Image (tube, rainbow, N blue to C red):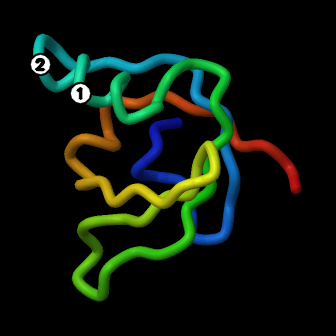
Amino acid sequence: MTLDELPVGSTGSILKVGGEGILRCRLLDMGLIPQTTVKVTKVAPMGDPMELSLRGYVLTLRKEDAHSIEIEEVPV
């Protein structure tokens, strides 16, 4: 499953960060690295962007970018 498919309030663990070039580097720089736990806290009314909670901070990410991150859902 990819990060953009994770429902609001659910938690997942990052398995792989895809993308190419500068986008992939930017995602990794923002802390989206394998084995990081991520929680989807909100999604904008029109469905994009989504708000994530990870590593003690909040990150807003476009669904297009979230689609390149593979995760597995973690039971709470």
Q: Amino acid at mark 2?
A: Ile
Percent from the top left, x then y, of residue 23?
16, 25
Answer left or right for 13 relative to 64.
right
Q: Quadrant of residue 13?
A: top right
The answer to whether 41 is drawn above or below residue 14 in the figure is below
Residue at the farthest bottom position: 45
**Amino acid residing under circle 1:** Arg
Q: Which residue is mark 1?
A: 26
Horizontally, is 22 left or right of 50 in the view?
left
The residue tagged 2 is 22
Q: CA distance from mark 1 to mark 2?
A: 6 Å
Callout 2 crowding tier (Cα within 10 Å): few <14, some 14–19, many ≥20: few
Q: Residue furthest top?
A: 21
- Point out the image quarter for the C terminus: bottom right
Residue occupying the point 31% across, 30% down: 27
Vertical position of residue 46 compared to residue 41: above or below: below
Q: Are marks 1 and 2 in contact (CB under 8 Å)?
A: yes
